[in-house]
Image (tube, rainbow, N blue to C red):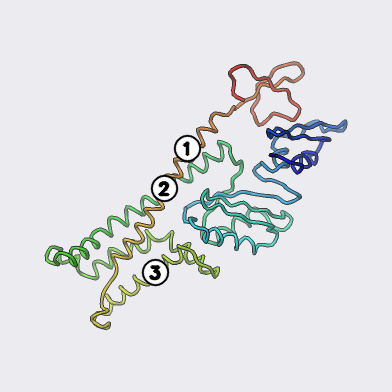
């Protein structure tokens, strides 16, 4: 329920001398005799009471970013971003919703700007996009396009990882549990396995490695960091055993290329499925937003006018006919 803060914020808007917010969340205001020719817009009032794209509460601005590219899937990942933002001068508060992949930052715009905040978030390894108009079709469509681009990128990486890993996995599993005679001889060659898994390590696993190393650079760790360290260790050990055969003791002279390929491919597959699920949720939200009215019929100087919903002013008399969207 809106409270005194919302009312006080309404009164702070230029040309509003009084404000009221009822229990249903509706807001109204009265204009003084010295009101401007162009009354405060709904966007300005929304920003004042804390529901606009850039909200102002007690002199502190709040901005919301959308996290792109996935990877923010645990409280530790979210905490990494929050800790980085806390080090930026002018930031009063930073909150990350890793489930919705949203970052909300309260800051003093006299000390820091939105571009600096975005750069700080991206320095932790995550891509972000400014949510210009949260809850509107414009923002939801932009995020849908970004989500589809993310899905396409993850699909390419997963397909590459699958195609290159399966031959190595087949060779190792069949060779160990059935017979090496059932496996083509060239697939048992370590150099062949190295050639197949190296692109998986560098291309398929890049989103994980990139975020993992940046997180480690900030003296913290998350799931990406652990996966990066583990796969690099297994890959490096395998490369050493391939380049210098016979140096390691016979019991330790083994390679783990298939493990590297399987881990990275499955992790990316999980992120791909997650991205598709979120895209489906976003589509449902866009359909709901599509139900809202695009224009409003207002009565000005005794004449009804159809205008874009964004141009409705405080004090306008809106005419709603039976069956129309509100």
Left or right placement of residue 86 versus residue 8 in this view:
left
Residue of label 3: 230
Which residue is at the far right? 33
3 vs 2, front mark: 3
Q: Dividing the picture into quarters, in which one does residue 107 lie?
A: bottom right
Of mark 3 and mark 1, the one earlier in the sequence is: 3
Residue of label 1: 283
Above or below, 272 against 24 in this view is: below
Q: Looking at the image, do the residues carrying marks 3 and 1 touch, with CB atoms under 8 Å apart?
A: no
Which is nearer the eye, 240 or 18?
Answer: 18
Which is nearer the eye, 265 or 20?
Answer: 20
Q: Residue at x 23, y 60 (%)?
A: 167
Q: Residue at x 68, y 19 (%)?
A: 319
Q: Which mark is residue 151?
A: 2
Question: How far apart are the alpha carbons under marks 2 and 1?
Answer: 14 Å
Q: Percent from the top left, x then y, of residue 67?
A: 53, 51
Q: Residue at x 49, y 64 (%)?
A: 222
Q: Percent from the top left, x then y, of residue 223?
A: 45, 63
SS type, badge 3: helix
Callout 3 environment at 10 Å: few (<14), some (14 to 19), or many (20+)? few
Callout 2 environment at 10 Å: few (<14), some (14 to 19), or many (20+)? many
Q: Residue at x 45, y 62 (%)?
A: 224
Callout 1 environment at 10 Å: few (<14), some (14 to 19), or many (20+)? some
SS type, badge 2: helix
Q: Percent from the top left, x then y, of residue 101?
A: 53, 50
Q: Looking at the image, do the residues carrying marks 3 and 2 touch, with CB atoms under 8 Å apart?
A: no
Above or below, 277 against 293 in this view is: below
Q: Which mark is residue 139?
A: none
Left or right placement of residue 126 versus residue 95 in this view:
left
């Amino acid at each position: 329920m809106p409270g005194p803060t919302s009312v006080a914020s309404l009164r702070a808007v230029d040309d509003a001398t009084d404000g009221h917010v009822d229990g249903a969340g509706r807001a109204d205001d009265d204009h003084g005799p010295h009101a401007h020719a162009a009354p405060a817009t709904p966007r300005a009032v929304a920003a004042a009471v804390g529901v606009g794209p850039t909200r102002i509460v007690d002199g502190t601005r709040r901005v919301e970013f959308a996290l792109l590219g996935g990877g923010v899937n645990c409280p530790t990942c979210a905490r990494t971003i929050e800790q980085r933002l806390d080090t930026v001068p002018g930031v009063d508060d930073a909150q990350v919703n890793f489930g919705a992949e949203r970052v909300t930052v309260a800051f003093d715009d006299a000390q820091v700007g939105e571009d600096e905040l975005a750069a700080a978030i991206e320095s932790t390894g995550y891509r972000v996009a400014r949510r210009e108009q949260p809850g509107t079709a414009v923002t939801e469509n932009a995020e849908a396009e970004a989500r589809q681009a993310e899905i396409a990128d993850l699909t390419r990486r997963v397909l590459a990882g699958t195609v290159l890993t399966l031959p190595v996995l087949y060779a190792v599993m069949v060779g160990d549990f059935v017979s090496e005679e059932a496996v083509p001889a060239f697939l048992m060659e370590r150099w062949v396995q190295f050639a197949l898994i190296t692109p998986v390590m560098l291309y398929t696993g890049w989103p994980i490695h990139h975020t993992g190393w940046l997180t480690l650079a900030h003296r913290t760790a998350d799931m990406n960091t652990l996966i990066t360290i583990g796969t690099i260790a297994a890959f490096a050990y395998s490369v050493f055993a391939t380049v210098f055969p016979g140096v390691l003791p016979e019991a330790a002279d083994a390679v783990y290329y298939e493990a590297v390929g399987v881990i990275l491919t499955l992790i990316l597959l999980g992120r791909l499925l997650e991205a598709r699920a979120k895209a489906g949720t976003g589509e449902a939200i866009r359909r709901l937003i599509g139900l809202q009215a695009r224009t409003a019929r207002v009565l000005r100087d005794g004449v009804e006018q159809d205008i874009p919903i964004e141009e409705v002013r405080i004090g306008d008399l809106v005419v709603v006919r039976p069956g129309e969207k509100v």
